[in-house]
Image: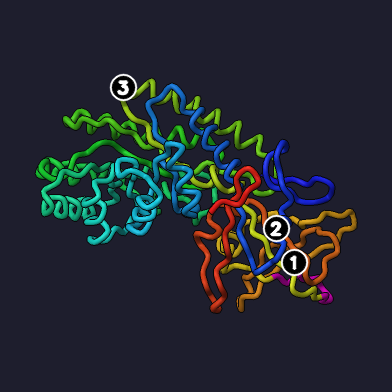
Amino acid sequence: MYFYEDNELHIGSKERSHPVSSFVKSYEGPVYIYDLNDIHTRFNAYDRAFAGLHHTIHYAMKANSNPILLKKLASWGAGVDTVSAGEIRKALEAGFKPEKIIFSGVAKTRKEIEFAVENKIKQINIESPAELARVIEVARAKHQITNVAFRLNPDVNPQTHPYITTGFRENKFGMDESFLPELIKQLKGATDAVKLRGLTMHIGSLLFDLDVLVEAMEKTLAVHHLLTKEGFELDRFDVGGGLGIRYETQDATEELNMLAAYGERLKQVVQKHLPAKTEILAEPGRILVARSGLLISEVQYIKRAPAKTFAIVDTGMHHLLRPALYQAKHRVLPLKSATNRHSYDVVGPICESSDVLAKNVELPELKAGDLLAMADAGAYGFSMASQYNSHDLPREIVVENGAVQS
């Protein structure tokens, strides 16, 4: 977490924090700073929400794949959800055991599936009959039985940005009930190659409506019962991830209360429909890591145009794509606060009109050399960064108990 103390932005807990400026004394360019303590607190809160269920939390690595962060999550007992062979490799290098690794994603190549099968990971989440056929072919060639789960598309429409909705009928993700006859036929002819362990669902990101999540679970569990009647012994149910945070505020009370309420709703559904031995899998990403991160940049120029004033900084859409891609609004925090306020558009160096990090934000009077922090940048920040216009990638600093980790 981060907050102001004596007009200076601090990172850490109220009991033990350090000025953000202490980590960028010799500024060398844009840098992400992550607070491991905040991530640990949230991981524990997620774990508590699922208490009483046989469960495993598989961190969605796509949100942030910093190797130090991954090693810590592995040491805390987390599993991991991956979407490429590259992510599987990173997970193994970070210390995740193969039996803690799930492989998701809609376009798994033969080479990637071979890598997953060879490493005997926990399960491959199947997105289509064609993908199941490929997994069967690879597993059979390697004389292995590979665990799979079917990703169901429950056809619910959560109220979130259309680019991060994944469980609606028009989305590319998952399968509906019409796929079942073909899938069942494939499974029954491939008992030597694959074993169906359960179902998985993921309806989108930045979710706050628990009723929609429960509806998706109920629809997915109806398919679970159909497959059980067909003779498949399913012992896993993957509820996905997607719980959101309110980027417009620093107050995390709502999201943490939502997480606790989500756990209670989940328990009601699971205990009503599934045997107690069923392993419940979850794939949180953003809610664990977003609040931990700050992206620090330096003001290069102040440009006063007739219509508005621009604060031109040395980071932009190439380092934090969310504002340009999703019209996301990240708070902009000066490292030193002051009462005098002026309105700025904070813009970056990229040769695109969409390279705007924030519009009409109230900040202290800025000058070249001042440092700014983009808040809540721990998820889908560095992991989506590029070297567009041949700019360098930002650095990353991981902080725990006020000390830089390496």
The stretch in magenta equals: 304-313
Horizontal arrangement in the rendering, residue 344 relative to residue 391 (left or right): right
Instruction: Look at the picture and state if 166 lies above or below 210.
Output: below
Instruction: Look at the picture and state if 250 lies above or below 383.
Output: above
- Main SS of residues in magenta: strand
Q: Position of residue 196 (x, y in %)?
A: 22, 39
Tell me the mark number nearer the camera, choosing from 3 and 2: 2
Find numbered disc 3 in the image and state the secondary structure of the residue it sits on: loop
Q: Position of residue 33 (x, y in %)?
A: 62, 55
Q: Of the residues shown, which amino acid type is indicated by label 1?
A: Asp
Name the residue located 80 percent from the left edge and 76 percent from the top edge.
303
Instruction: Look at the picture and state if 219 lies above or below 20.
Output: above
Horizontal arrangement in the rendering, residue 54 relative to residue 392 (left or right): left
Mark 3 or 2 closer to N-term? 3
Residue 373, which numbered label? 2
Q: Nearer the viewer, residue 8 or 215?
A: 8
Q: Nearer the viewer, residue 226 or 13?
A: 13
In this figure, which residue is indicated by the disc labeled 1? Answer: 345
Residue 305 highlighted magenta (yes or no) = yes
Q: Position of residue 187 (x, y in %)?
A: 15, 42
In this figure, which residue is indicated by the disc labeled 3? Answer: 275
Q: Of the residues shown, which amino acid type is indicated by label 2?
A: Ala
Residue 326 highlighted magenta (yes or no) = no
Mark 1 or 3 closer to N-term? 3
